[in-house]
Image: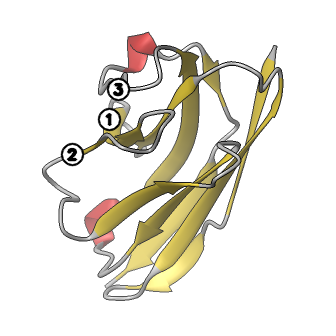
Amino acid sequence: QVQLVESGGGSVQAGASLRLACQLSGRTDASYTMGWFRQAPGQAREFVAAISYTGGQTDYADSVKGRFAVSRSSAKTTVSLQMNNLKPEDTAMYYCAAYHAAAWAISTRDDSYDYWGQGTQVTVSS
């Protein structure tokens, strides 16, 4: 079993930066692809970014390319999402997710992910 805990959310002005972190615990002796998704009130959950177990493969939603960067610790158990030049439309609950996969695998589909954190709120005001 795997547990995910997010941290780092908050309320900021447009143009500011935030760094989210996701700590993976439990059975960490396997390779897990990890992703970030977000959901705004009244909207469907959407993909934000993903990173393979090795960290060598990453993918981003078009809406965040060039502003967000996902990274993974050398121990593979912490994934960070650096968010720069935040916009009001980035306001949402951000969720970390993981699934057991090959070391180079990556997915933008939320139905690929088996484990989810509780979420951390990001609010960006104009």
Query: Residue 39, located in which quarter of the rendered image?
Result: top left
Residue identifier under label 1: 46
**Residue 50: % across, % down:** 38, 39
Query: Looking at the picture, how far across and down is residue 27, in whole percent?
Result: 82, 20
**Left or right of 113, for residue 126:** left
Residue 85, numbered label: none
- The residue pinned by badge 3 equals 106
* Disc 1, SS: strand
Which amino acid type corresponds to the residue marked 1 in the rendered image? Glu
Between label 1 and label 2, give the one nearer the viewer: 2
Dot 1 and dot 2 residues touching (CB under 8 Å) = yes
- Callout 3 touching callout 2 (CB < 8 Å): no
Between the residue at mark 1 and the residue at mark 2, the CA separation in whole angstroms equals 9 Å
Residue closer to the observer: 59 or 13: 59
Q: Please name the residue that numbered disc 2 is placed on.
A: 61
Can you name the residue that lies furthest to the left here?
62
Residue under the image location 81 percent in, 13 percent down: 1
Q: In the depicted view, which residue is nearer to us: 54 or 77?
A: 54
Q: CA distance from mark 3 to mark 1?
A: 16 Å
Q: Residue at x 57, y 39 (%)?
A: 96
What is the spatial separation of the Cα atoms under label 3 and label 2, in whole angstroms?
13 Å
Residue 61 placed where, x, y %? 21, 45
Name which quarter of the figure residue 88 lies in: bottom left
The residue depicted at 70 percent of the width and 37 percent of the height is: 118
Q: Secondary structure at mark 3?
A: loop
**Is residue 91 something that shows in the picture?**
no
Q: Is residue 14 above or below residue 89?
A: below
